[in-house]
Amino acid sequence: MVTHGDGIFTTIYSSGIAGGRPHVTLCLLQSLQSCVISFGTANAAEDAPFVRDVSYTPQCSTPTLSKLVQLELTFLQKAIKARASTISQEILSPAYANYSTHTNQLSRFRATRPYYTKLVQTGILKSLIPKSAGGTCEKWMDSGLIVEEVHSIDASLSIHLVGTVLGLLPLILGGTTEQKEKFLAPFLTGKEDHLASLTHSEPGGTANHLEKGGRGLAVTARKEGDFYIVNGEKLWTTNSAGWDGQGATLSCLVARSSEDGGPEKPENTPEDNIMVLLVTRDIVAQNPPEAYAMLSEPNLMGHIAVTGPHTRYTNFRIPTDHVLFHPGQAAPIIEKSFGITGAIVGAMAAGTMRTAFELAIDFARRDNRGGTVPIIERQSVADLIIDVKVKIDSARTVLLAH
């Protein structure tokens, strides 16, 4: 029985989840504990999502999906969801079998490049960028629909997309018209394999970097003539080193303005010194080779082909006309960027849970555990499946209705 570790979840985990993705079921079990209610916020949607529940007859027969609750998507949203599903199935389904044969994080990440390129060429990246910024996304709810479909097929390649959107958000939310026209352009063409990064996290973590009296960000920027001189290290900054270790197409580099490069002074208000600099591959190329270095590509459990490199800036020069936010302007926009993508992370979790559920119910329909009927016809298993399905759909409803 499931309660003794001999059922759906244990068996799927030990068998490698249909080709080697045990993290999917692990994420399902963890996510269901909280029902994925706390996803952050997104713009309110006028139209609620379509939800399907599981029902079953009391004679322990096979559970069937029925429309107990129907909250319809609009015609356009259904089309967006269907298109994302088709694209994800056709392009991403073969990806895992390819990149999982590589033995380290960096080579696995680079092996995803042709799949990411194909995704971009379908216009799916542009569909995650707000229409007001030149993309085709009219509501953040639409982004959630797309991301769930992509993430349900491949949990690594979806991070390339979501990380790029996160990397562009500070520019989208607070950049000047001229900056948007210049730096967003590559991401709106539907061509090539452009990556963006919100380059924020650092060794030791940055969750409390705005706390007064703390060290503050360790990456510092000092103005010197027509340049800012940047020093310090970043870590777990999705996409920031690009495909070749020479930088993403665009990095919104978060740094602390400091003349001496030391820790934040106790009397200072940290957010008054936070700034954002726009770093392109051209800027990296214009610096000496030792000014920007990719030190390592750490292994990321569960996302085995995602890039979150450890990088170092050493007297790295950035022109002053590449300032996105001057000291004192950046902190609210950075927090808002992370808040918006919190909802997208919720969509990713829904995609993971859905995939695990589909694998679990397929197993329950095929396996009898030595008995005379498939275990889905056993009351305890049916109850568990129903409970899981209700929680997944409830979580999705909370996500998409906010």
Image: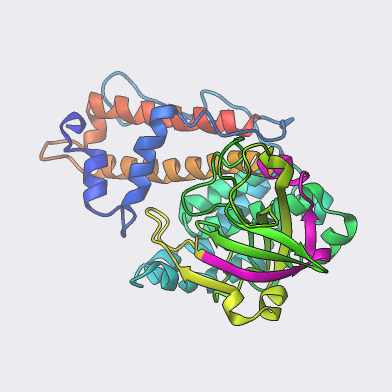
Residue at 72% across, 76% down:
282
Residue at 30% across, 52% down:
17
Of the 4 image quadrants, the one containing the N terminus is: top left
* Colouring rule applied to residues: rainbow
Q: How many marks?
A: 0
Please tell me whether residue 113 is drawn above or below residue 331 in the rendered image.
Answer: below
Residue 94 lies in quadrant: bottom left
Residue at far right of view: 177
Residue 223 location in percent, x, y? 76, 62
Residue 287 location in percent, x, y? 67, 78
Query: Residue 390 magenta-drawn?
Result: no
In the image, is 132 to the left or to the right of 357?
right
Residue at far left of view: 370
In the image, is 207 to the left or to the right of 341?
left
Of the 4 image quadrants, the one containing the C terminus is: top right
Residue 129 seen in render: no
Residue 353 lies in quadrant: top left
**Residue closest to the eye, 4 or 313:** 313
**Residue closest to the eye, 227 or 253:** 227
Residue 153 location in percent, x, y? 47, 55
Query: Residue 332 magenta-drawn?
Result: yes
* Residues shaded magenta: 311-336
Residue at 71% across, 71% down:
317
**Residue closest to the eye, 277 or 105:** 277
Residue at 21% across, 45% down:
11
